[in-house]
Image: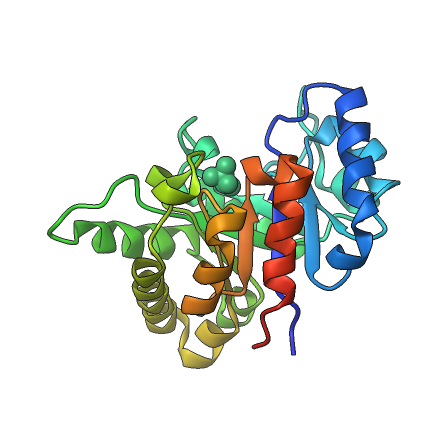
Amino acid sequence: MAKPILVANWKNNPGSKAETLALLKELSKKREIYKKINLFIAPPYIYFDLVSSKISFAKLASQDFPRLKGIITGETASEMLKSFGVRLAIVGHSERRALGETDAEVAEKAKAALKSGVTPLICVGEKERDEEGNYFDFLRNQIKSSFAGLSRQAAASVILAYEPVWAIGKGAKDAIAPGDLCQTIIFIRKVLSDLFGRNAAESIKILYGGSVEPMNAGELMRESNIAGFLVGHASLKPKSFEQIALSLAKIVR
Ligand code: PGA
């Protein structure tokens, strides 16, 4: 049985080295809970050294993956991520897509990550929902082009994060309803199956992200066939994060 996956997306937080150390100290007090799940922490690159030495209860993840090779001022190289033991890379987060990242670039980053032995966590999600259900077409196209060029075998080892943009950075009451999540996950699985065949589609793990908080984590997990969560703001609050981890640890699939 695979352990549920929890990915902490710290984004460009905490605001200082001292706050990062304080957060790590609080998280490590609950190490026994975190060991029960498959926890990844994705800090800003600048804190990699600090974080990697203090998270025996979690694995290090990156918030992006370099697409280009060569000498580039201001960039981080894939070898550097590997040298810190990065195992998972978030690619195509909606906040990066909002800065102009295209589906084609997301697909290239996913391929680059796989080539380096790093699991890509490809993020997809509609900006809004309409009554006519046009967002299903949007999702299908976004998945198709963000997974473009991946073989069945490569696709099977990708993790997909479904993060509806309208639900990000709010509160549990504004997140997706469990029934709607369940329906969307079935749709995503069908799209993956059309693209890569049923076997590969079934091995692609799907996470949900977008205002996951202690209040909605258990229900979202129970009511839909997801493998875990990608958590933003609640991952910076030790008490909330611990409760989310606890509700995942209780799930037996
Ligand atoms: P949130 O962010 O949990 O703050 O909604 C999730 C994300 O952006 O990955």
Residue at x 45% of width, y 34% of height: 169
Up-down relation of residue 226 to residue 105 (above or below): below
For residue 231, which quarter of the picture? top right
Residue at x 46% of width, y 48% of height: 123
Question: Residue 70 vs residue 248: left or right?
Answer: right
Quarter of the N terminus within the rendering: bottom right
The spot of residue 194 in percent (x, y) is 32, 72
Query: As drawn, which residue projects farthest toward the left?
Result: 132
Nearest to the observer: residue 57 or residue 241: 241
The spot of residue 208 in percent (x, y) is 46, 54
Quarter of the C terminus within the rendering: bottom right
What is the count of numbered marks? 0
Residue at x 51% of width, y 60% of height: 218
Residue at x 75% of width, y 41% of height: 81
Up-down relation of residue 190 to residue 22 (above or below): below
**Res. 62 visible in picture:** no
**Res. 194 visible in picture:** yes
For residue 192, which quarter of the picture? bottom left
Question: Residue 119 vs residue 208: left or right?
Answer: right
Q: How is the image coloured?
A: rainbow
Question: Residue 220 vs residue 28: left or right?
Answer: left
Nearest to the observer: residue 43 or residue 104: 43
The spot of residue 150 in percent (x, y) is 49, 61
